[in-house]
Amino acid sequence: MALVLTSLSQVAAFDFDAVIDVRSPSEYAEDHLPGAINLPVLDDAERARVGTIYKQQSPFLARKIGAALVARNAARHLEGPLADKPGGWRPLVYCWRGGQRSGSFATILSQVGWRVELIDGGYKSWRRLVVDELQNAPVRAPVMVLDGNTGTAKTEILNLLPEHGLQVIDLEGLANHRGSLFGARMGGQPSQKAFEGRLAMALATLDPARPVVVEAESSRIGAVQLPKRLWQAMCNAPRLRLAAPLQARARYLARGYADLTEDAARLAEVIALLRPLHPAERIARWLALAEARDHVTLAAELMQFHYDPRYEKHRARFESTRDRVIEVADLGADALPEIAARVARAAFDMLARV
């Protein structure tokens, strides 16, 4: 039986015991359905080999060799990750177009006695839903932007807002990047397609009756690009701007970027990337502060001479009479819940005035 995908909310509500992507590891790594596991019936080298034989020798020979490889890999999966699955186990299987790879594997699983379903159109059906959500659908909920200069704990505060009835989309979390030169995170970023899939699912499940708050970003977060429709909604949205003293922000950054500051060599490499933008003497001082582990002073000077001027220039493009500034004196961990409560109250008040 082939399942026709009609909406992203349908994908979010899947009740299968497993979603199995039988494409090659590189295809899976680029993007896959939410929660899918990879049980490839052809690995990357095998897929390339079968494709070459199909084009250069014979489609019949390619299918025969491919069938042998699929059977061999299916046996390995049955004896390995699927060995403990009970008789009532119900998987959903897909490949690129819902064709031979997924069909072959599903046939084998069904012969075991499992209730297998295929996705009609395979991965391409999922991708069409993602593209439609990002390029054609309006953002379902009123958008508000949480702004503030570097070090104002925007991401942490953002993720406290659901406790106060607000919806949030953590764009930096979806992109696995903190959105600056110093923002790389362990594990690296998802591909553009994978990021878009995560974002589309977040957008598709929004409640239209409640505002959604996103953090102020440029149109690019690290290596991934925000879709134009969402970016335009963010540019036109009212903004809540956090304002905090430089030293409070510097102390926060020294804590929040501990993963980077603990790696002295990596920190020095990132500072060195700023050479084209600052005098040699300033770069040398920042490298010396990093070596001395004076991370608070380093953070303060990076903000004073690098980030704050750029933020102010960028913000001038969006600032309007609708914006509201929330002054905070302390960004310690104990202070963040109260700041989040203040942000939520301001958000609902601003929405009521629209």
Image (spheres, rainbow, N blue to C red):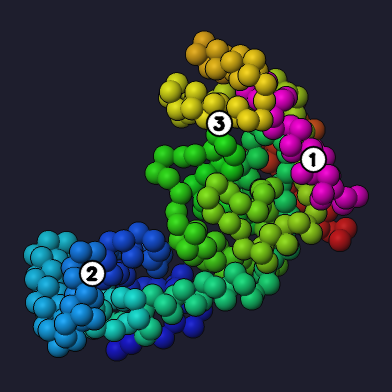
Q: Is the stretch drawn in magenta largely helix, strand or loop? A: helix
**Dot 2, how many residues are within 10 Å of its Cα: few (below 14), some (14-19), or many (20+)?**
few
Cα distance in 3D space between marks 2 and 3: 39 Å
Q: Is residue 27 magenta?
A: no
> Which SS class for mark 1?
helix
Q: Which residue is mark 3?
A: 273
Residue 313: assigned label: 1
315 to 307, vertically: above or below: below
Quarter containing the C terminus: bottom right
| Magenta extent | 298-326
Q: Which residue is mark 2?
A: 48
Kind of residue sitting beneath label 3: Leu
Q: Position of residue 181 (x, y in %)?
A: 57, 37
Q: Position of residue 62 (x, y in %)?
A: 16, 81
Q: Earlier in the sequence, mark 2 or mark 1?
A: 2
**Dot 3, how many residues are within 10 Å of its Cα: few (below 14), some (14-19), or many (20+)?**
few
With 114 as the anchor, is 346 left or right in this view?
Answer: right
